[in-house]
Image (cartoon, rainbow, N blue to C red):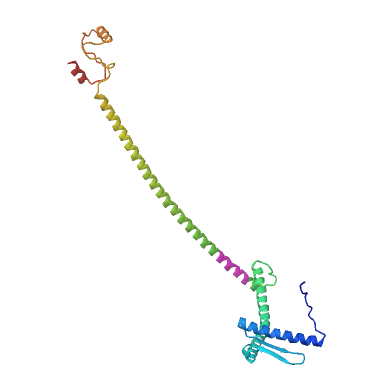
Amino acid sequence: MGRGRVQLKRIENKINRQVTFSKRRSGLLKKAHEISVLCDAEVALIVFSNKGKLFEYSTNANMEGILEKYERYSMSEKEVVEVDIRSQGSWNFEYSKLKSKVESLQKSERQLLGQELESLNQKDLHHLEHQLEVALKNIRSRKNHLLCDSIADLQKKEKLLQDQNKDLEKKLKEKEKERAQIQQSSWEQQSQAQQGSSSSSTNFLLPEQFLNIGPYPSRAAEEETEGLGQPQGQVRVKSILPPWMIRSMNS
């Protein structure tokens, strides 16, 4: 079973109270020494018994130096607190001053919007009108400046687009020119091939069914020559050969 929580209260028995004081005092002094050694801290401990007897502990037996350091620290803390108290009054005054200034600016803003004009006299209204005219003039000037800047930007973009269109048109023309050259070269090659094939075909004789040459013509040729009154044995040529070739063959 764990030990329950001990309720802290004054020990009524005098002997027990004295024994507990002695034990707890020794333990407290021991803990002060341990924290001073382990953590390299400056510790000062002062204990008075109920009879007024003094028990103390200080790091390196420097109780006076630690107490002086404590007094300096406590005095600086007091000075800071006093400064805060004095500055609080000045801050309150500054707050009220800024608050009145904000209220005045808000009222002026409402009057510029055309509100709460009842408290203004003719001079104030004239001054307010002049402020509005100056503000309107500045607004128009700023608006015109922005419009000019936007127009200049649009002109720059237009010029850039025109340059891009010119470049694209130039590239397109170059592509069309290259395509025309390729087509022209292909047409020339095709015409040269056709001319070569036609020249090679004229160098050879046509088949027998298109050309009848010799002293013994076919039956159909003889009948045709008889019908036309031409003598037999004469060369009958049916071809597309040139006349000089036919003459040379008949001779």
Farthest-out residue, left: 251
Q: Which residues are magenta?
A: 127-139
Circle count: 0
Q: Residue at x 75, y 86 (%)?
A: 21
Locate the C terminus and report the quarter of the image it occupies. Answer: top left
Q: Residue at x 35, y 37 (%)?
A: 183
Locate the N terminus and report the quarter of the image it occupies. Answer: bottom right
Q: From the viewer's perspective, is 94 left or right of 179?
A: right
- The image shows residue 77 at horizontal and vertical percentages of 66, 85
Does residue 85 lie above or below 116 as drawn?
below
Q: Is residue 136 magenta?
A: yes
Q: Residue at x 37, y 42 (%)?
A: 176
- The image shows residue 34 at horizontal and vertical percentages of 64, 83
Q: Is residue 11 magenta?
A: no
Farthest-out residue, front: 1
- The image shows residue 146 at horizontal and vertical percentages of 52, 61
Q: Nearer the viewer, residue 12 or 189?
A: 12
Judged by its main secondary structure, the magenta piece is helix
Q: Quadrant of residue 215?
A: top left
Q: Residue at x 57, y 68 (%)?
A: 134
Does residue 182 lie above or below 155 as drawn?
above
Q: Quadrant of residue 78?
A: bottom right
- The image shows residue 129 at horizontal and vertical percentages of 62, 69
Q: Nearer the viewer, residue 8 or 200?
A: 8
Q: From the viewer's perspective, is 11 left or right of 139?
A: right
Q: Nearer the viewer, residue 125 or 148?
A: 148
